[in-house]
Amino acid sequence: MTTENFDSAESLEERILGGLDAEQREVASTLNGPLCVLAGAGTGKTRAITHRIAYGVHSGVYSPQRLLAVTFTARAAAEMRSRLRDLGVGNVQARTFHAAALRQLQFFWPQAVGGTLPNLLDHKAQMIAEASRRLRLSTDRASIRDLASEIEWAKVSMLTPANYLENAQGRGTPGGFDLTAVARVFQSYEDVKTDRNVIDFEDVLLITVGILQEDQKVAATVREQYRHFVVDEYQDVSPLQQRLLELWLGGRDELCVVGDASQTIYSFTGASPKHLLGFKALYPEANVVKLIRDYRSTPQVVKLANDLLAARRSGGPVADAAWATPLQLVAQRPAGPVPQFTECTDDEAEAATVALKVRELLDAGTPASQVAVLFRTNGQSEAYEQALAAAGIGYQLRGGERF
């Protein structure tokens, strides 16, 4: 669809902005300078930022090839690209941080480093097991998993084996090892990767950052390519991702960030909402727009969420500013049932209780397609699967894929 055809159907502003609420419309029509969108769950943030991109492209403010939209999962990036295509701007790049960095790394590696880019390592487990064997350390699947998580945290925090120990105090005993042993495994892991000529996902970001810092010609080329940036789920950026974003920007401020400090879910991997919360301090001229109309949940669910967050902010263990700017959501859907609470003694009892409730619903005539069991992590699924199977209840498991 061309811009001309798009404009001829009806006015540009009405076509793109007409279906937005007042706050979404403010986001979509604020095209220049730094913009911070504080958006609660279900408030239509993806709708707002995709319409902003479309409005900017069709009005001539943005060149679609010079705008990069960054989000955290491949699924979210695909959803954004789909929505942009529907709005007539299918040639805008929407990628994850890793995908965008890998694309740049593949392109610039020959001139910046030379030779062939090492192969990308899908999983760390085998390499960490080898690194541990070299040190004569005994590991099992659980300890290897914990060591992998700790090494990922260290690398996205831009730590090296040499300075890990002094910066990791208070992090416990990952994999059952003291921090000195973890530092040794970390170094051994890096050595194994070098021997195997492979890099991991964190290396993709680290090497790209290194090239952009050291090679001004490459940095200038990237900054010429991308003039405007949109970052979704900004509360989950790590120090490494933030550094990459800063290098992409090169001191410019054509940046729109979207997030909610209350929704930080990757803190265990080094993510921090401090970048979102400090955006106004970094960019004093930034516009800040709050999306608070919740179109997803009933008033009862929204009230529960608001109350829980208010209690967390006032008396929880988090002492920094992450909870200082509450987003008090306002439900837009009709009323629904009041949420009910059941407290169980352990995971198995909880799963058995859930299976019993599902059986009661099915026996009462509720279609199975209208019953869902939600759990926080993939690791919790086994208990529920066993309990449902024991109760003779068929199920479909979704959401278990790796992001």
Image (cartoon, helix red, strand yellow):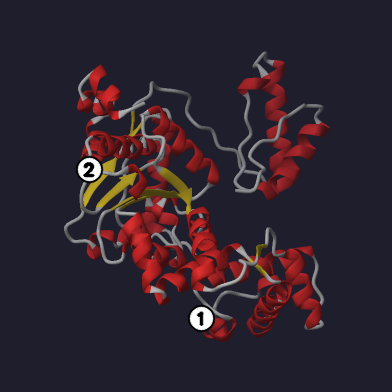
Q: Which residue is mark 2?
A: 61
Evaluate whether residue 346 shows in this view.
Answer: no
The amino acid pointed to by label 1 is Asn
Pick the residue in front: 64 or 329. 64
Is 257 located above or below residue 118 in the figure? above
Residue 257 picture location, percent across and down: 33, 51
Residue 206 picture location, percent across and down: 51, 70
Evaluate whether residue 309 shows in this view.
Answer: yes
Q: How crowded is the residue under tag 1: few (<14 C-alpha within 10 Å), some, or many (20+)?
A: few
Q: Which residue is mark 1?
A: 167
Q: How crowded is the residue under tag 2: few (<14 C-alpha within 10 Å), some, or many (20+)?
A: few
Pick the residue in front: 44 or 50. 50
Pick the residue in front: 56 or 234. 56
- Residue at 23 percent across and 64 percent down: it is 281
Is 269 located above or below residue 346 in the figure? below
Q: Quadrant of the N terminus?
A: top left
Left/right of residue 241 with respect to residue 19 in the rendered view:
right
The amino acid pointed to by label 2 is Val
Residue 7 picture location, percent across and down: 24, 24
Is label 1 in a helix, a strand or a loop?
helix
| Residue at mark 1 to residue at mark 2: CA–CA distance | 44 Å
Is 136 located above or below residue 35 in the figure? below
Left/right of residue 182 with respect to residue 283 in the rendered view:
right
Pick the residue in front: 205 or 350. 205
Left/right of residue 62 with respect to residue 358 in the rendered view:
left
